[in-house]
Image: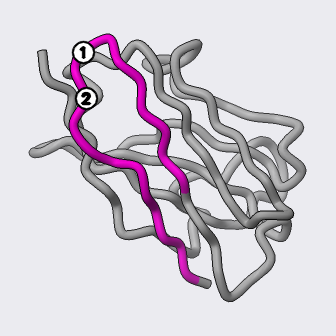
Amino acid sequence: VQLVESGGGLVQAGGSLRLSCALSGGTLSSYAMGWFRQASGKEREFVASIIWSGTRTKEADSVNGRFIISRDNAKTLLYLQMSSLAPGATAVYYCAAGRQPSGVGPTEGRVNNWGQGPQVTVSP
């Protein structure tokens, strides 16, 4: 399985950006999917996740209400719509695929595949 992200870049504070993640070499509906991010000098942290069917999602408190995760299994695409961006959102964003027996995942420990991580930079 390979994950290829697109949509990163530079945006001004208050703006919006959408990340996409294309899965190949597998069936998207077989995986719980998620987004994680890592800011410079910090540990990687959870952003959002979505179960295989797309009917349940979970977002980190820090992004709740501003970031929306969604998926299109027919197109094998995962999305992260980010709105009202602040400089604190500057990070490398990673798409993740895994298995989650219960709850909404994948949690970081259950990720089997990672994307390459595009840079998102939010300027003041």
Q: Which residue is located at x 62 percent, y 84 percent?
A: 1
Q: Name the outermost residue toward the bottom.
A: 25
Q: Tag 2: Cα neighbours inside 10 Å, few (<14), some, or many (≥20)?
A: some
Q: Amino acid at mark 2?
A: Val
Question: Between marks 1 and 2, how big is the CA–CA gap?
Answer: 7 Å
Q: Is residue 88 above or below residue 47?
A: above
- Horizontal relation, residue 14 to residue 62: left or right: left
**Residue 16 at x, y percent in the picture:** 41, 24
Q: Which residue is located at x 69 percent, y 49 percent?
A: 105
Q: Quadrant of the C terminus?
A: top left
- Horizontal relation, residue 85 to residue 87: left or right: right
Pick the residue in front: 110 or 95: 95
* Circle count: 2
Pick the residue in front: 42 or 19: 19
In what element is the residue under mark 2?
strand
- Horizontal relation, residue 2 to residue 13: left or right: right
Q: Is residue 103 above or below residue 29?
A: above
Which contiguous range is marked in magenta? 2-20
**Residue 22 at x, y percent in the picture:** 60, 67
**Residue 29 at x, y percent in the picture:** 84, 65
Q: Amino acid at mark 1?
A: Ala
Q: Which residue is located at x 27 percent, y 42 percent?
A: 120
> Toward which corner of the image does residue 96 lie, by quadrant?
bottom right
- Residue underneath mark 2: 11
- Residue underneath mark 1: 13
Which of the numbered marks, if any, corresponds to residue 111?
none
Q: Tag 1: Cα neighbours inside 10 Å, few (<14), some, or many (≥20)?
A: some
- CB-based contact (under 8 Å), mark 1 and mark 2: no
Q: What's the magenta bit mostly, secondary-structure-wise?
A: strand
Q: Is residue 14 inside the magenta stretch? A: yes
In what element is the residue under mark 1?
loop
**Residue 56 at x, y percent in the picture:** 83, 35
